[in-house]
Image: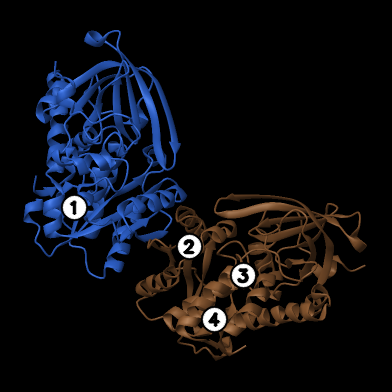
Chain colours: A blue, B brown
Amino acid sequence: MTGRIEIADLPDIARGAAILGTGGGGDPYLGRLLAERVLRERGPVPLVAPASVPDDAVVVLTGIMGAPTVIVEKPPAGPEFRNALESLQAVLGRPVTHVACLEAGGLNSMTPIVTAAETGLPLIDGDGMGRAFPELQMVLPTLDGISTGPMAMSDEKGNAVVLRTVDNGWSERLARSATTDMGCSASIALYPMNGAQARAALVPGTLGLARRLGEVVRRCRERHSDAAVAIAAEMGGVVLFTGKVTDVERRTEGGFARGEATLLGLGADDGARLTLSFQNEHLLARRDGRVIASVPDLICVLDADTGEPVTTEAMRYGFRVVILGLPCHPRWRSAAGLALVGPRYFGYDHDFVPVEGLLAP
Amino acid sequence: MTGRIEIADLPDIARGAAILGTGGGGDPYLGRLLAERVLRERGPVPLVAPASVPDDAVVVLTGIMGAPTVIVEKPPAGPEFRNALESLQAVLGRPVTHVACLEAGGLNSMTPIVTAAETGLPLIDGDGMGRAFPELQMVLPTLDGISTGPMAMSDEKGNAVVLRTVDNGWSERLARSATTDMGCSASIALYPMNGAQARAALVPGTLGLARRLGEVVRRCRERHSDAAVAIAAEMGGVVLFTGKVTDVERRTEGGFARGEATLLGLGADDGARLTLSFQNEHLLARRDGRVIASVPDLICVLDADTGEPVTTEAMRYGFRVVILGLPCHPRWRSAAGLALVGPRYFGYDHDFVPVEGLLAP
């Protein structure tokens, strides 16, 4: 997807981004409203492919950091996006030339559109993860040795924090505390890099992919066909489970939304029980105690009737949902990738098995 | 005190600073060792009176932020002092010309000597409080509307944080969390101001005063005379209580050392009980339930035998101590001063009464 992002593109992008957000990344509807407002005021945002970014570009990743549960209650006000970028620019000492998405997921596929529109900068069609992950260091640029810092944070009150840390994990730690102080939500601008680094490290085409996925869901609804099956086919993934939410245990702790959801099977899955564990994003799916999908693969929850993605904070008792397992970007399946975002990092005592493999007979 | 600070000056300054530290500000012995090492390597530090600082000077206050209980166990390594100042200088975009003490108290009367020696800058004989207080916004520059920010923090690992906040209370809040993440101790450089602001806002002569108080204690010990009485006379304060520590309840929480100490009276105070409440520094002294001294006045604990100041983290069961009440800088007794550092700010339900008045018949 190149050219420009207009208001008419937003509904599909928001819907598709919520699928890539794997339950996290914040409420896409909120992000869509925010982006709509700014596009109405400032016009379309130029969108460029990573491959066209020149070597000497100054690329910055942006997004919102915090607990989605809180972000829903305290929507971003607007100026904090521009403030974070300008804080970073001031310490860089040179103008930022391109904005890109830190993550492809929900709200955070929309907030870089806001930053780009407000600063007049072009947006790169790509992101640092190819999905959403809960922690800052969980991006492909970390695998390339690119530093988070200098990293800028800004809240809606006007507070600004700049971090330069010894590694990207320390940025996550310090920024998470500051986010908690700021009310569990902050605008961030980080991973300043040149064009060559951006071309190598970013997952290309994620906004275009989000729009395509959103379009698939919309078309399926119009045709009364199965969106989950169509998404699985589009992404090379599998339908893991169909069931009804019977319990959601959720807590906001350490600046994250953490919890577990329990589902009882319907139809072909009648009698089975699925448990989803999440930290902002879904991390692990267990069917009757057996792990059937895990990070870094994408575990996505869709409304069984409408095909609309369901975020972890929107999940409620009684929801009938379909669970999809979609393969992650291949670099996440490397040893270094799994050390950064694999199930063991999150404290689960089992190795990663690709979602395709787990379902093979 | 002007001219320069040499190694021979350090023992008296450290001892006197621990008195002004009112139990907090960290272990002065540790600070003395740190300053000794750097003065041995780099020679004496030029010391200038606030009155001689030119209008166009760039003055920065420095110190260590954290819980004294932890700082004792994790002494500052050295480079973090210089790193904090240089981080701040980078965002200011112009060279810092003078260093001054954030607070006059224990370790934090010594750490600016280290910063000055390592950066080759002159040190101003003055500080922001005239004593030690537990929170960053508790300085006279706050009463003058001077901002903490931009404020820089640095840890011994090499992490750096820069804050620009909407008010000085927000700097305290964000910096306290970062300090906790950094291991409950961080080097800070803050309150950048010009020379005119420094002359108006800093308490002049605190390093000279610390040296004089330290000398009084040393001379009293040599002559076997009563140091507590001599200090009270020197400072226009009063001896509040003589007793034995019977209990110390202490906890490290929210990046502070908080707690209470209970003392039973000896000699003229036989039969009476004194309770000291502290948050890094002593905040309140209650004799048999009645408040006899409170912030912002100084409540100082001296060893009954040697006259040496006793920090809150060094207080132990069985210590025989003398409690002094010394008047604070007059600006702290204004309405604005008491709103910032009076007993009600710390949650105690009573008005401030000057230590001199409480003891009047």
Locate residue B33, reporting x and y percent: 55, 73
- Residue B198's label in the rendered image is 4
Q: Chain of mark 3?
A: B
> Which label sits in the foreground, 4 or 2?
2
Do discs 4 and 2 belong to a common subunit? yes
The residue carrying pointer 1 sits among few (fewer than 14), some (14 to 19) or many (20 or more) residues within 10 Å by Cα, namely: few
> Which label sits in the foreground, 3 or 4?
3
Q: Quadrant of the C terminus of chain B?
A: bottom right
- Could you tell which of marks 4 and 2 lies nearer the N-terminus? 2
Horizontal side of B274 relative to A157 (left or right) equals right
Question: Disc 1 and disc 3: Cα gap in Å?
Answer: 45 Å
Question: Disc 2 and disc 1: Cα gap in Å?
Answer: 30 Å
Question: Disc 4 and disc 2: Cα gap in Å?
Answer: 24 Å
Q: Which residue is mark 3?
A: B28
Please tell me which residue is depicted at 19% across the width and 22% down the height of the picture.
A358
Q: Which residue is mark 1?
A: A144
